[in-house]
Amino acid sequence: MKNVLDTRYVSMKGYENPISHFAPIPVVWHDGKFHTSEHACRAAPFINVAPKVFEKIRNAQTPIESIEIADMYKHIIPPSWHQRKRRVVMEISLAKLEQHKEVRNALLASGDLPIVLDTSNRYWGAGRNGRGLNVAGKIMEFLRDELIRNRYPLSQEERFVEESN
């Protein structure tokens, strides 16, 4: 596997980066409003398992706090979560795109560069050596491609304008 950190890429990290799960951009998912998409991603495994933990994560003050709370309860995450986690993170990322034009614009501005979550996590990110699976980055690349190909997702106001024409 090639080291993705050896090439030009768009980073998914940072509080100021709209495509980052840490960006202070709220997302509504499963009838709940989350401070960030990181909050939603961390709460998701607990939605039908431990509603109080789900709410505790949803209401965490920061993305880091949401991670810390989720880590405290990771022992109760059902094994079935691992079969669904990619799809759920895709849903949350799509919800964020649909709800915020600034996120769509930032994603489009990434052009055709690889999108990388440059973190030590080998599943969601590039890993310490740049050879991780980078699933989070690949999800954003997929959504970018869909956005370019289909002009989707459109915000409510963009849908109205298109339907009016």
Image (cartoon, grey):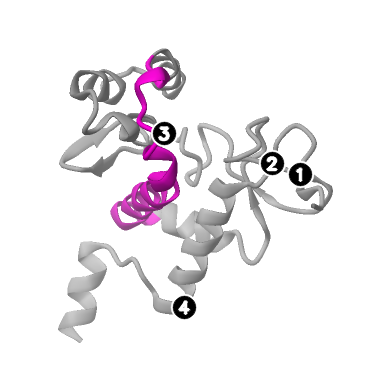
The residue pinned by badge 4 equals: 149
**Residue type for callout 3:** Glu
Specify the principal SS of the magenta part: helix
Dot placed on the residue nearer the N-terminal end, 4 or 3: 3
Comparing labels 3 and 2, the label whose residue is closer to the camera: 2
Q: Does the magenta stretch include residue 81?
A: yes
Dot 2 or dot 1: first in sequence order is 2
| Residue bounds of the magenta highlight | 73-101
Mark 4–mark 3 distance (CA, rounded to whole Å): 26 Å
- Report the amino acid beneath label 4: Arg
The kind of residue on which mark 1 rests is: Arg
Residue lying at 30% horizontally and 67% vertically, measured from the top left: 154
At label 3, counting other C-alpha atoms closer than 10 Å, the crowd grade (few under 14, some 14-19, many 20 or more) is: many
Disc 1 crowd, CA 10 A, few/some/many (<14, 14-19, 20+): some
Q: Mark 1 and mark 2 in contact (Cβ < 8 Å)?
A: yes
Q: Distance between the residues labelled 2 and 1?
A: 6 Å
Residue that numbered label 2 is attached to? 126
Question: Regarding mark 3 in the picture, which secondary structure is present there?
Answer: helix
Label of residue 109 in the image? none
Q: Which residue is drawn at 25% across and 25% down?
A: 54
Residue of label 3: 38
Mark sitting earlier along the chain (3/2): 3
